[in-house]
Structures are given as structure tokens and as C-alpha cells.
Image (cartoon, helix red, strand yellow):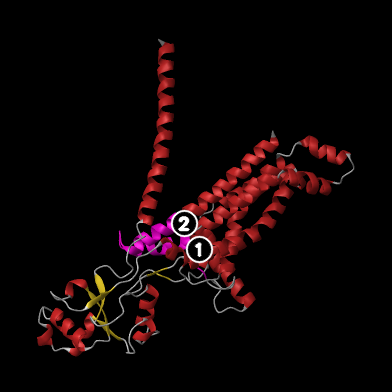
Amino acid sequence: MRLWFRKVGEAFLLGMIRASGAVSSLVVILIVVFLFKEGIGIVGETTVEEGFVLTVHRDNPVNDLTPIQVKDIFDQKITHWAEVGGKQDTIILLHLEDLASYYTEEQIGANLEGIPKCLQHFIDSVPQTLAFVPGNQLPHGYTGKIVHTPPVTAAGFLADREWFPTAQPSAQLGVMPLILGTLLVSLFAILFALPLGLATAIYMAEVADERIRRWLKPVIELLAGIPSVVYGFFGLVVVVPWVQELFGLPVGETALSGAIVLAIMALPTIITVSEDALRNTPRAMKEASLALGASHWQTIRRVTIPYSSSGITAGAILGIGRAIGETMAVLMVTGNAAVMPSGILEPVRTIPATIAAELGEAPFGGLHFKALFALGCILFILTLIINLLVESVSSKNKIRTR
């Protein structure tokens, strides 16, 4: 009987373990599918605000405008139709509320029932008009022409250089500044963190005595457990004023500040993984080097580091992954300017910071909402590439160890 209960218990535990693995895998797959379903949904969407249209006189030769042209027209950077392929006329902009300046309250009506008629009259009377109005305010049998904007494409989404997802009348959805900002901050973070992290790992693995190592290792591992918002506060209070004063900048929230904070955050990962790799160097190899007359430092440089290079590389890649995916600390110290980065001393915005800052303001299911999910897809792909690199490097390390 006891044997029967033990077999039943073992079978139950085995079933629970298998079910846990299956459920975990299914949840991950569903999250990825949901992420890409929402993100890919932005392709083919129009950038004009939902429910609104751009309309012109029926004789206006302009049929299409790009989002950039629409933005420049409403920013008064383009003032003549000839600049977008039309006639030599000045562009007259019209919003719905502008009708109150041209028509009386009696013509508009107490319940705004006269707006469609006024709109039709204004478009017919002023042929150079470009109107941005709700589509449901166009009169039945409207004789004007709707100006179309090209739908969002994957290439345009990745290559365009302006990110203004809430701009009216046409959103600007170019993620290039965000991608470059993310890569710039991550690159400099790893350039700062890798030499310091590697030196610390060598000290802990080869130089420090056991008593210091036992004290130092938990302290470094504790750094990995500190919440990122605490690093953000540290960066805001210490790093940002320091960078501003050192370089004489008007503001200290720059890519450099973000890189320094991310470098500090990436150090525990780099040190821990690299130190483990260095300590895995066979003792016989080090003793053979010393027996041949090499010094301690020559043994470290010629034997230990080359043998551990795969593990050190994996630590560096994991540190890059930590830097790319970090959100809160970067949000607090980089200035959050969604512009093309021109240098390390300029404010930038990263992809995780953009998602965190804007998701709460994006209407559910809208264009902005889908654009943020598309950013999540880009971040997922970057992280996946990094993980595949780590797997590749680790596999080489295992083969080499055998």
C-alpha cells in the first residue's frame, strides 16, 4: 500500500511539473502572439486622426499628402499649394471652429445643424482651402474632395525621423530617433561598464583573497537587486548635475547621463558572469603556465582571460541586454527628447522609456496604442537577438570546456 501511495505521489508531482512547464510555455507564446498582433496592426493604418478628414475644393489638383507635408502645412512651413504639386495659391487652413469667424450664429444654428452647409459654402467660395474637419460634418452630396494620406508601412515606420504620435491632423510615426537613442545609450553604457566590470571580475577571481571575495561578492550581487527607480534617483541627484557642470551644458539630462547610470546597473551582471567564467579556468592550465616561468599577471593575460573569453563575452552581451531593456532609470535621466541624436551630450529618448511614458495616454486600440506595441515588437526582437548571441557564445564555451 505504501509503495502504491508513493507511486501515485510521484506520478502526481511529475504531472504537476509537466503542466507547469506547458502552462508557462503557453503563457509566453500567447504574450508574444498578442504583442505582435497589436504591433503589426499598425501597418496599413491611416495617420489622420480617427473620424476626421482632410478636404479641399474639387478643382484642387492635389489628391494625396504625406504625413510630413500635412505637418509642415499646419505648422506654416509650407504656405503655397505649388510646394506640394498644386496651383500657385496660398493655402488657407480651416478647422471646424474657424467657421464661427466667417458665419453668423443663425447660419451655424443653435444646435450646429448649419455646419455642413457652411462648410460646403466655404470650400466652394475659397478654392485654396485645406480643411481638417470631422467626417460626419460633411453634408450629404458633398462636392469637395477628400485628400488621402498614405497608410503606415513597415519601412516608413522604421526609417522616418519624426516621432509625434499625437500630432494633429496627422501623426508622425518614425521610430528611427528612438532606435538610435536606445542603441547610443546602450553602446556607451557597455563601453563604460565592460572595462570596469572585467577588472573587478579579474580582481575577485585571481587577486583578492578568499575573505575579501566572500565579502565583496554579496555586495556586488546586492547591486543587481536594487530597484531601477533608486538608480534613477541617484542619477538625477548625482550624475545629472555632475554632467551638466563638467561640460557646461544647459541641462544635464543627456545620453551620457543615461549611459553612466546604465553602466552602473550593468556592472553586477558583467562582474558576476565574468568572475564565474574566470574561476572555471582549469587549475592545471594556470599551474602549467606558472611552472614554465610566467608571472601571475602573464598567466592571467595569456591563459585565464583567453580561456574565459566566451564567458566574458556572454557577460558583456547580458549587460547590453540589461541596458537596452532598462526603463525607469533611463526615463529619469536622459531628457526624453524624441529627436535624432546628434551626440552623447544631447537629450535622447529610448524605446522602453517611450512605452512607459506614453502608454497611459494612448487610447486603447488606437493608432498611438498600436504604434507603442510595434515599439514593443522591436524591443522584443532586439532582446531575442541578444539572447541568441548569448546562447551561441555559451554553446561554444561548453564545447571548448569538453
Q: Is disc 2 surrounded by few (<14), some (14 to 19) or many (20+) residues within 10 Å?
A: some
The reply, left or right, for residue 203 in relation to residue 236 is: right
Is residue 141 shown above or below 182? below
Circles 2 and 1: CB atoms closer than 8 Å: yes
Which structural element holds mark 2? helix
Q: Position of residue 84 (x, y in %)?
A: 37, 81
Q: Is residue 219 visible?
A: no
240 on left or right of 84: right
Q: Looking at the rendering, which quadrant does residue 116 occupy?
A: bottom left
Specify whether residue 360 is painted magenta: yes
Q: Who's the residue at 65% across and 60% down the image?
A: 191
Locate residue 369: give its quadrant: bottom left
Would residue 78 be counted in the magenta stretch?
Answer: no
Which residue type carries mark 1? Answer: Ile
Q: For the residue marked with disc 2, what is the amino acid?
A: Ile
Q: Secondary structure at mark 1?
A: helix
Q: Which residue is drawn at the image coordinates 36% and 86% (left, top)? A: 82
Residue for badge 2: 378
Taking the view exactly as shown, the residue that stands out farthest to the top is: 1
Residue 49 seen in render: yes
How crowded is the residue under tag 1: few (<14 C-alpha within 10 Å), some, or many (20+)? some
Return the x and y of residue 158 as percentages of the image width and height.
46, 63
Which tag, 2 or 1, sits closer to the chain's start?
1
Q: Quadrant of the C terminus?
A: top right
Q: Please state which of residues 375 and 48 is positioned toward the viewer in this rendering.
A: 48
State the CA–CA distance, disc 2 to disc 1.
9 Å
Percent across and percent down for residue 380 are 47, 52
Q: Which residue is mark 1?
A: 179
* Span colored in magenta: 348-377
